[in-house]
Amino acid sequence: MQLLRLAQKSEFDTIRIPLPSSKSESNRALVIDALTLGKNEITNLAEARDTQTMIRLLEKSPPVFDVLDAGTTMRFLTAYTTVTNQKKVMTGTARMCERPIGILVDALRAIGAEIHYLNKEGYPPLAIHGLPKQTTDKVKIRGDVSSQYISAMLMIAPILPLGLEIELEGKVGSRTYIEMTLELMAQFGISYTWEGNKIQVPHQSYTPTRFAVESDWSGASYWFSLLACADSGELFLEGLKENSLQGDSAIVEIMDHLGVKSTFQNGGVLLQKQAVKGLKNWDFTHCPDLAQTVAVTCAILGQNAIFTGLESLRIKETDRIYALQQELAKFNAELKEIEPEVFQVIPSVTMPRQVQIHTYDDHRMAMAFIPLLTKTEVIIEEPDVVNKSYPSFWKHVALTGVESQILSEA
């Protein structure tokens, strides 16, 4: 096991952070590009392993699509290979094959797809045999499990001979990711309507265009958190837009309560310290990838915040609720379920001299606990896990002057 030791540092001079590109935007743009036979000019694609896996699979088109641990790649390529009538096996890591995909497979089967499970019903690996004939133009999908199922169906909808109407059942989670998908489709010439719980996408063609991927707001959140917990300093995050398609731009509003002022300037956003106003509660339904970051920040800053909308965290790279509870306890904080699906952050009152964070093969666990270094020495287990979404993260941490050391394997 590799360990990365990070020295304590609580003050940061004005530092520019060259953020990575958005993995979410990149992966959607790549699927749309594949559906238009690569006629677009797409720039600033993400360096994230998930995106690079998508690029490799689309370019080489092997008979087995091994997506590794990339959930978005699994879901998007399942729909893409089906609608383009390719015969593929979809598989991934052991954890990927424990993540459910039944809702998407059921939706694809409902419109005429031929897909078979090769092991456990409802989970990868899958054998895809294509879509011989579209049998209906209407499908129902639960909205409270993963927006990626819905986005996968939306992106293939225009090229279906009958188009597609998707009826969202129940509570809709991660709505901003669905909106991102639709807005990206619109930039490639697609028209749609979303009225009530029904999204209608007529049969039509994508229009080849130029598209530049924005910097990643999920990656930006860790820098907001670091500054929130620091004693002083300011950071400039490059490549972010004020009117972003990414739902994780909600971090601006959240961190305004937790002591970070955001000022958009040419080329990015300037983060400066301000007084902590306090965060009493937040619903993460539409930005679940921010939950770990905000939980750690509140635990450090003494905020007894109430969190809701965490349901999807249990089926991510790990059970993120369990993982948070285990790691917060290491510096005497808690994430307590006070009633079903309602959680309270119980802040830390005493900080150990050193905290070692287990990362659970989850990139966001490694990065979410970074603000701890403003209060104590931190050791991160398996630091390379960040390659999934932010390969340059530790290089960017070094830009802030934080001293680090790779320890011998234990």
Image: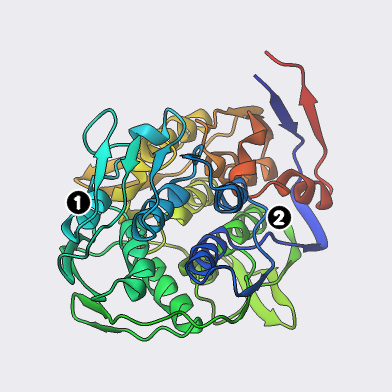
Front-most of residues 395 and 6: 395
Task: Name the residue carrying label 2.
Answer: 231
Distance from Cα at disc 2 to Cα at disc 1: 51 Å
Q: Percent position (x, y) of residue 275?
A: 60, 68
Which residue is found at the position 54% from the left and 32% from the top? 359
Above-or-below relation of 41 to 354: below
Is residue 347 shown left or right of residue 301?
A: left
The picture places residue 142, in percent across and down from the top left corner, at 19, 58
Q: Which callout, 2 or 1, points to the residue nearer the camera?
A: 1
The residue that disc 1 covers is 106
Single out the residue that lies furthest toward the front: 132
Q: Considering the numbered disc 2 on the image, is that residue within a helix, a strand or a loop? A: loop
Q: Which of marks 2 and 1 is nearer the N terminus?
A: 1
Left or right, 59 with respect to 43, comes to left
| Residue 84 screen position, x and y as percent | 39, 60
Res 123 quadrant in image? top left
Quadrant of the rendering where the N terminus is positioned: top right
Question: Which quadrant of the figure contains the C terminus?
Answer: top right
Please give the label number shown on residue 93. Answer: none
Q: Which residue is drawn at 63% across and 28% down?
A: 382
Question: In percent of the image, x 58 and y 46: which residue is there?
Answer: 53
- Residue at left offset 50%, top offset 67%: 257
Compared to residue 111, the image places residue 350 above or below, namely: above
